[in-house]
Image (spheres, helix red, strand yellow):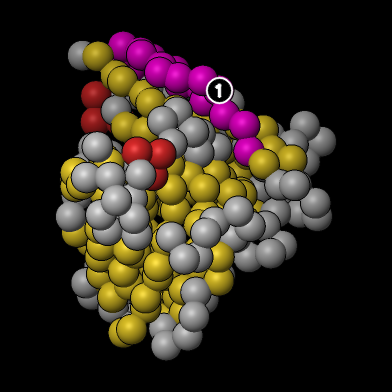
Amino acid sequence: GDSVTQMEGPVTLSEEAFLTINCTYTATGYPSLFWYVQYPGEGLQLLLKATKADDKGSNKGFEATYRKETTSFHLEKGSVQVSDSAVYFCALFTGAQKLVFGQGTRLTINP
Amino acid sequence: GAVVSQHPSRVICKSGTSVKIECRSLDFQATTMFWYRQFPKKSLMLMATSNEGSKATYEQGVEKDKFLINHASLTLSTLTVTSAHPEDSSFYICSARASGAKFSYEQYFGPGTRLTVT
């Protein structure tokens, strides 16, 4: 079945460091891909999305490119801030109209 | 806009009792609501999809008699865990899709409810 695999956390970085959180997926067809972010005490929020191969989603300095050849959707940011500390979830939207999530990666940014 | 709340945020109950969790869309009407369960260091697992005014559709392996879902209005869905046992302890998250949403994947998530069964 459809599945998403994220890199294990937690990830701890210093402010202004470069961030990569790996995400790979298994799916039939061509799913839409997403990154969600969950700040402490809040619900998951859509961070960015890509709906077809080679699309790049971007928001708040974060980027991810839909790579069909490697079935990946890695999240990157060039210079992280303390306020980026959160849990990040990679997800895909299946042909059965359901969201399938990775296990989440907790990110902590130290000043 | 597009805020979803859950109540309570944390609940502790004794084994054998039932507990109800509410999910509300605060500033929009939600034709469809979803209930997820999250185990520690695991992904969110979809439990069921509920449409306002009709019976919920449960995912394979989810006991419908144990996890009762009611979606009686366009802004409220409830999940009742009946005869709770310690293995039901988990983090339960709801989400809501707005009526008339342009894309099927558009869902707004609540902050979750931590259930502990002792």
Query: Residue most toward the front?
Result: B16
Image coords of residue A24 (percent x, y): 67, 33
Pick the residue in front: A38 or A16.
A38
Q: Which residue is mark 1?
A: A7
Magenta residues, start to end: A4-21
Image coords of residue A76 (percent x, y): 50, 28
Q: How many numbered discs sit on the rendered protein?
A: 1
Q: Residue A68 falls in which quadrant of the image? A: top right
Q: Is residue A61 left or right of residue B48?
A: left
Q: Does B107 lie within the magenta span?
A: no
Q: Is residue A111 left or right of residue A34?
A: left
Rendered-image quadrant of the C terminus of chain A: top left
Pick the residue in front: B94 or B104.
B94
Q: Secondary structure at mark 1?
A: loop
Residue A24 versus residue B68 in the image, above or below: above
Q: Is residue A30 left or right of residue A89?
A: right
Residue at 43% across / 48% down in the picture? B37
For mark 1, name the chain: A
